[in-house]
Amino acid sequence: MLGSYWLFISGLLFVLSLLVHQVPLLLVSLLLFLVGGVARLWNRYCLSRVEYQRRLSARRVFCGEEVQLEVEITNKKPLPLPWIQINDEIPDGVTLLKGKTSQSHLMNRVILSNLLSLSWYHKVIRRYPISCQQRGFFTFGPAIMRSGDIFGFFSLEEEVKPLDHLIVYPKIVPLEKLGIPSMQPLGDIRTRNHLFQDPILTMGIREYNFGDSLRRIHWKTTARFGRLHTKVFEPTTTIDMGIFLDVRTVKPPLWGSVPELLELAVIVAASLSKHTLDEGFRVGLYANQNNTSSGGFIRIPPSQHGDQLQHILEALAQVFSSETIPIARLITNESRNLPWGSTMVVVSAMPTDALLAVLFQMKRVGRKVALILVGNAASGISTDGLMVYHVPDDIMWRDLETLSISGRGH
């Protein structure tokens, strides 16, 4: 830019004017020196006391909802700014309904640019409605402010580092639309008042009746009386459900993903979580990949806490297609931490032989298990003896666009 050489050029003209005895040339050199000095001073303070703020009308929304992005640029000094440009990085996973963006050199990022002028002690606010059509954890920022003097000799850049985050929850739909009967979900859970026997709380011993499980036999009493006796457990209304989400959507050992299948699996897990929590059950979520925020596996133990659905939806919003651990190994590891009477629900688009073997093993030892097959790729798999539900992939464009619910209040 000319600003880099203004002192050299003005000095050269000054010397030349003295050599040729030209007064007009001398005046030009002095004028250039004066203008350059003013421009340099202007450029030094142009971004001083200039504030850029970014605000989102909501930090958490459901897929399909809109949020408003508001940017505020304030000049808190008597020096006016003839021009200032702010390039703000925003995620390309959201859609601006107003304004234009340009491609960033970073992956999955675009640039929202604002070019304007600010007089002294002037503030400008611009609002951009955003449509959130894709679930995820989105980061806004940082922004780069660039300004300079009125002559265009110099320019100065400054980074605005504060970031803003937006979480877009997955869609939630009624279970009936997914082919899962909500009045009797997964066979074992009927109503919140249904009594189950807690295998931890023993209330007494009685003689063996035909049909009693051999696992309940009290061997010491049996040996004492010479007849089979079984334990009697206290009834309980507490029901735990562990939802295991398999993020793999292609047949191993291939790597890659089918985004539609993953999205449908996430919708199934979110819808099932909300329904069972609304019914008063304790629900937990497990997924075979690392949590982007904590670094460990996605592991939310069963709970009825008021924020449990929010924790589950936030975890599901950040699910991506790369698995960290096979789902079969995750189930084996985490099943030890689930109460014995818990129902284990596995949502998978590509169940492997290892997964089916683990589920059969869990059922043989007395665990309550259910498998939800997502998409048509999983059809034809032998699941005899398992409780299986099938959610076809064509439901994505047939029903879910109009049947999503916001789930506000959770």
Image (cartoon, rainbow, N blue to C red):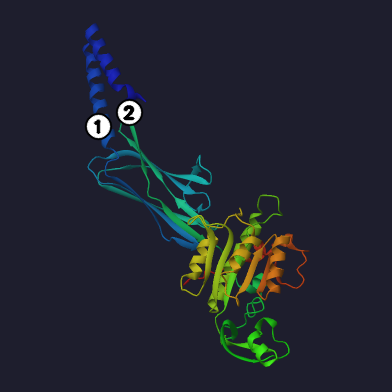
**Nearer to me, 21 or 349:** 349
User: Residue 187's x, y, as percent?
Assistant: 67, 78
Task: Indicate which disc residue 341 carries.
Answer: none
Picture residue at 67% right of the left edge, 93% below the top = 225
CA gap between label 2 and label 1 equals 11 Å
Q: Secondary structure at mark 1?
A: helix
Question: Looking at the image, is 58 positioned above or below residue 279?
Answer: above
Residue picked out by circle 2:
153
**Nearer to me, 222 or 390:** 222
CB-based contact (under 8 Å), mark 2 and mark 1 = no
Q: Secondary structure at mark 2?
A: loop
User: Residue 289's x, y, as percent?
Assistant: 58, 57
Question: Looking at the image, is 291 positioned above or below residue 386?
Answer: above
Task: Indicate which disc residue 41 carries.
Answer: 1
- Using residue 308 as the reference point, say whether residue 233 is left or right of it: right
User: Residue 173's x, y, as percent?
Assistant: 59, 69
**How many residues crowd mark 2 within 10 Å: few (<14), some (14–19), many (20+)?**
some
Question: In this rendering, which labeled residue sits more in front, label 2 or label 1?
Answer: 1
Question: Looking at the image, is 122 positioned above or below residue 346?
Answer: above
The quarter in which the N terminus is drawn is top left
Q: Quadrant of residue 22?
A: top left
**Nearer to me, 273 or 291:** 291
Picture residue at 60% right of the left edge, 76% below the top = 340
Q: Is residue 308 visible?
A: yes
Type of amino acid at the residue the image marks with label 1:
Leu
Type of amino acid at the residue the image marks with label 2:
Phe
